[in-house]
Amino acid sequence: MSVLSRWKAKLAIREDLEKTAKTEHTKAQHDYEVAQAQHLPTVEALKNARDAAGNKLRKRRAQVAEAEKVVKRHSKVSAPVADKTKISPNQSSRGGVRPRLIVLHITVSHNRPGSGDVDAILNFFAQSGTQASSHIINDAEGNDARCVPDEAKAWTQAAYNPQSLSIEQVEYADKPRARWLSENKAGLENTAHWVAHWSVKYGIPLRQSTGSGVCQHRDLGAAGGGHVDCGNGYPIDWVISRAKELAAGMKA
Ligand SMILES: [Zn+2]
């Protein structure tokens, strides 16, 4: 085979290879253009939307901060004062432990019109044989009583007593959320007021926690005595969010 015919054969092969490469490039360019057409404006639009949302968020945050300042300046919530006080002998020293936990209970007794329901629990805790107590007792109408001073340890949640402040809310058991929020609104408001007060007084965070914060007795499990109060329907989220509003007014 001559040099010429060898190279003609090579040329034909190389032309085919070039044709294939061109086809591949054309397809890649097309794919790239399609992708560019479809995606780039989308990314750009998302970026613009993100920037616009960011600007809006900054504006909204500034508006919230301004409103918070005004609300703080104008609200003044005083510390709660219990309707009555009957100090229980069922208490002891916290042993130097600073309160950091607010534990909410129900008495598993019936709400009655008036403050007789609170008095019944207060008198029960006043007997040394009861061997139990709470810092505060309240009922669905918001009547309340002081049973143990904040500085002392009330006896109501076993191993958690040293670090806890406690409220016994007069209520029977397993009340659905909707009924708590309608029938016990004044009582929950009273509970939130005490929670806010203790939060400000001791720097207890207003969040659900069994370490440092607010919880139901049942959240403490066996170490807390293994009780089931306040129950599934208890609106602790409402209490905490209301306590936050009241605490903001107290700090002002
Ligand atoms: Zn309890």
Image (cartoon, grey):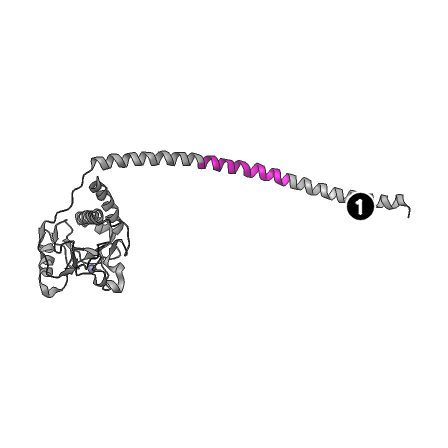
The answer to if 49 sits in the magenta stretch is: yes
Which quadrant, please, contains the C terminus?
Answer: top left
Residue at (26% x, 46% y) in the render = 241
Amino acid at dot 1: Ile
**In the drawing, does residue 68 fall left or right of residue 25?**
left
Q: Is residue 60 or residue 69 the one in the foreground?
A: 69
| Residue 222, position as x, y percentages in the image | 26, 65
Residue at (64% x, 39% y) in the render = 30
**In the drawing, does residue 29 fall left or right of residue 200?**
right
| Residue 85, position as x, y percentages in the image | 9, 53
The dominant secondary structure in magenta is helix
| Residue 33, position as x, y percentages in the image | 61, 37
Residue at (55% x, 37% y) in the render = 40
Label 1: how many Cα within 10 Å (few below 14, some 14–19, many 20+): few
Q: Is 34 placed above or below 240 here?
A: above
Q: Is residue 86 or residue 114 the one in the foreground?
A: 86
Q: Is 98 placed above or below 48 here?
A: below
Residue 230, quarter of picture: bottom left
Region rendered in magenta: 30-50
User: For numbered disc 1, what is the local secondary structure?
Assistant: helix
Residue 234, quarter of picture: bottom left
Q: How many marks?
A: 1
Q: Residue furthest front?
A: 96
The answer to if 38 sits in the magenta stretch is: yes
Query: Ligand 1: does it lie within 8 Å of the C-beta at label 1?
Result: no
The image quadrant in which ligand 1 is located: bottom left
| Residue 219, position as x, y percentages in the image | 27, 59
**In the drawing, does residue 238 fall left or right of residue 133?**
right
Residue denoted by label 1: 13
Q: Is residue 103 or residue 150 the one in the foreground?
A: 150
